[in-house]
Image: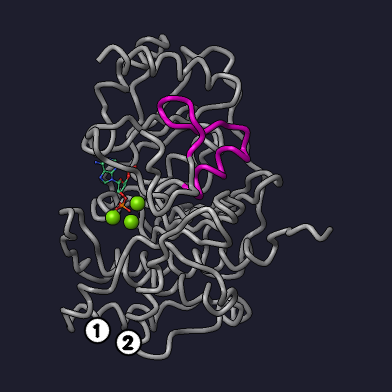
Amino acid sequence: MASADYNKELHIALLAVQRASLLTKSVFHSHSKGTLDKADASPVTIGDFGAQALIISALQHNFPGDEIVAEEEAKDLREKNSVKQTVWDLVQQAKLEDKSGEEALGGGIKDADSMLDIIDKGDSKGGSKGRIWAIDPIDGTKGFLRGGQYAVCLALMVDGDVKVGVLGCPNLPVDDSEALTENIGADASDAEGKGVLFSAVQGKGADSRPLGKGALAKESKISMKAVSNISDATFCESVEAGHSSQGDAANIAKKLGITKPSVRMDSQAKYGSIARGAGDLYLRLPVKKDYVEKIWDHAAGDLIVREAGGQVTDVEGKRLDFSVGRTLQRNKGVIAAPKDVHDTVIKAVSEVLGGK
Ligand SMILES: Nc1ncnc2c1ncn2[C@@H]1O[C@H](COP(=O)(O)O)[C@@H](OP(=O)(O)O)[C@H]1O
Ligand SMILES: [Mg+2]
Ligand SMILES: [Mg+2]
Ligand SMILES: [Mg+2]
């Protein structure tokens, strides 16, 4: 029986995320970010639209039959011609320096109206059948706006199971395997030594490499740090108190005997950080009872952490279920930890949350 090795999917995903990251970096440096408010009052920028257009165009060129679940839609651009024009300018400029990479992605997009149609191709309902890509063009948009951490996120699910995951983190230090960097507001982008590309394929472990402009750098294997004593663990959580309950996290940490303060970081850079052993735990604790997590906020990070030797579940210890549509409607919150201490963490989580 032929087994899928996902080599081509990984290669295209790495290049697509790299190219989209060049666009987000250019937005950060030379534009007003063109921030709009979405229906749920969360922000979206010209960088989100441009990155989504570039990634979908690369996927359509290489895997025309695949479905796509992406965070953004082109409605606002269709209504605001000037914003559409700005996004189109950005998309035309974002090119990989390496010609063969650019060719592999199918080159650029034909015109501004095709760009809008491409952005709207991310409207799949998701589900448990077939090949479905999940895209978060900028995860941690609030971090992006602050000059903090953000991530360009892409994952391939097959029959509801994540097979390939890639995270581009332009503001993470390349060399940070020991310390967890708190970076919630400084403009760190484009400084020397910044930019990391994380990736994983199911069953093949997790990798990281510097995120550059030219041909893909050589990867190295990453793994979570062994935690011999849970009270020595470092945990990370959202910067935004509205995304994860910082009070509950503090109580859970206390129960575990953890005395180090949490490291607050935006985006799936948290998953990448713990996967490379910079920090140990990632706690995402529901703030609002009715909030459902989105698959594009977790698919790539979930695989990268598990392939690096971690376990990722919801607050009840159930694996994240990516097979039920665009959201994680069967899960609440996220707890990521090294495999051998995950149960201990879940026990503390249930004591704290159960007592509420
Ligand atoms: N009430 C809420 N609870 C949990 N997550 C939320 C939330 N409101 C928005 N989010 C999600 O939190 C993501 C950012 O996560 P983090 O806090 O880890 O940086 C956002 O992704 P985007 O920035 O892509 O919109 C958004 O999807
Ligand atoms: Mg958003
Ligand atoms: Mg997101
Ligand atoms: Mg986003």
> Of the residues shown, which amino acid type is indicated by label 2?
Ala
State left or right for residue 79 relative to residue 157. Answer: left
Going by the numbered disc 1, the residue's amino acid type is Gln
Q: Which mark is residue 85?
A: 1
Region in magenta: 299-320
Which residue matches tag 2?
112
Q: Position of residue 122 (x, y in %)?
A: 40, 68
Point out the tag, 1 or 2, that comes first from the N-terminus: 1
| Between 310 and 103, the one nearer to me in the picture | 310
Q: CA distance from mark 1 to mark 2?
A: 7 Å
Secondary structure, mark 1, is: helix
The N terminus lies in quadrant: bottom right
**Residue 161 % position (x, y):** 58, 49
Image point (28%, 33%), residue name = 244
**Residue 322 appears in the rendering:** yes
Q: Is residue 110 above or below residue 141?
A: below
Question: Residue 187: percent from the left, percent from the top?
Answer: 29, 52
Residue 319 covered by magenta stretch? yes
Identity of the residue drawn at 22% across and 77% down: 77
Element type at marker 2?
Answer: helix
